[in-house]
Structures are given as C-alpha cells and as structure tokens.
Amino acid sequence: DGATGEPDWTRLRSFADQITLHPEWTAAAIADAPSPDSPFMSNLLAAIAEKLADDAKIQPPDWTKRTVALESRWEAPATPRRRAMHAENTPAQFAARGITLPKRAIWRDRELIPG
C-alpha cells in the first residue's frame, strides 16, 4: 500500500504461492518492472524477483539490476532474539538489497498452499 508505505504482505505471499505452484510462469511473472512508490518497495520486489529467478535457474530481469540497494538496512520490528532469527533466515537476494526478512514472510511450505 503506497499510502502507508506498508507492503500488502498477503498479496506478496499469494503471488509467491502461485509461482510455487506454477514455476513455468516465473519468467513472465517477473519480466516487467513494477512501478513501486518507495525505495523499500522497489528493493523488496526486486529481491523477490531475483529469488524467484534463482530458484527457477533463469536470469533475473534487467530491471532488478537498475534497482539501487537500500542505503540503510530495513528490518521488521522485533525483539533482538527474533531479529537474529530473521537475519539467519533472510535469503541472500534480500540481504544484498539491505532487507532483513525471513524467507517464510513471503514463501510458505508448498503443502500449506491452497490449490
């Protein structure tokens, strides 16, 4: 949601679920650059696209290379112990962009995906 700066986490998880169920859609799903309204969203979407591309063993789309990583690290509010757990479980693509977010914040275990 651009107005609040808070991502629509449910929508992002739904997108990841669909690509998990239909990996053949990956290249088409990430090909076009989104038009996010903040550096954080630009990097979050680029990190998701890069992880999906790496998982599918395809090249990430060119638009991700043009997305400049965050200057200051972003992490969800949490206790120090939880932050450490998040850091341990952050995909490399997210960490490279300055985002500390555990994989499970976006991707669910396949057996938990409806459909």
Image (spheres, rainbow, N blue to C red):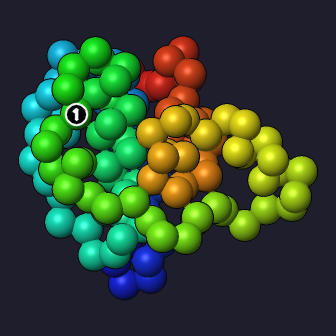
Q: In this rendering, does residue 11 appear at all?
A: no
The tally of labels here is: 1
Figure check: 109 above or below 43? above
From the top left corner, tell me how far across and down residue 9 is, in percent.
Answer: 47, 55
Left of 1 or right of it: where is 80? right
Displayed quadrant of residue 24: top left
Residue drawn at x 71%, y 45% is 86
Q: Please identify the quadrant where the N terminus is shown.
A: bottom left
Q: Is residue 110 above or below residue 98?
A: above
Q: Where, by quadrant of the figure, is residue 99 drawn?
A: bottom right
Please indicate whether residue 37 sits to the left or right of residue 20 in the image: left
Residue drawn at x 81%, y 47% as measured from the top left: 84
Which quadrant would residue 75 be assigned to in this image? bottom right
Mark 1, Cα crowd under 10 Å, few <14 / some 14-19 / many 20+, is many
Q: Residue at x 29, y 17 (%)?
A: 56
Q: Position of residue 21 (x, y in %)?
A: 33, 19
- Closest to the observer: 80 or 17? 80
The foreground one among 4 and 60 is: 60
Name the residue that disc number 1 marks.
60
Image: 28 above or below 57: below
Would residue 54 be found to the left or right of residue 82 on screen? left
Whether 69 is drawn above or below 91: the answer is below
Residue in the picture at 50% in, 18% down: 110
> Element under label 1?
loop
Residue 69 picture location, percent across and down: 39, 60
Residue 92 pos. (x, y %): 52, 36
Q: Which residue in the rendered view is the most extreme toward the bottom?
A: 3
Hey, what amino acid is under mark 1? Answer: Pro
Split into 4 quadrants, where in the image is the C terminus? top left
Between 46 and 29, which is closer to the camera in this rendering?
46
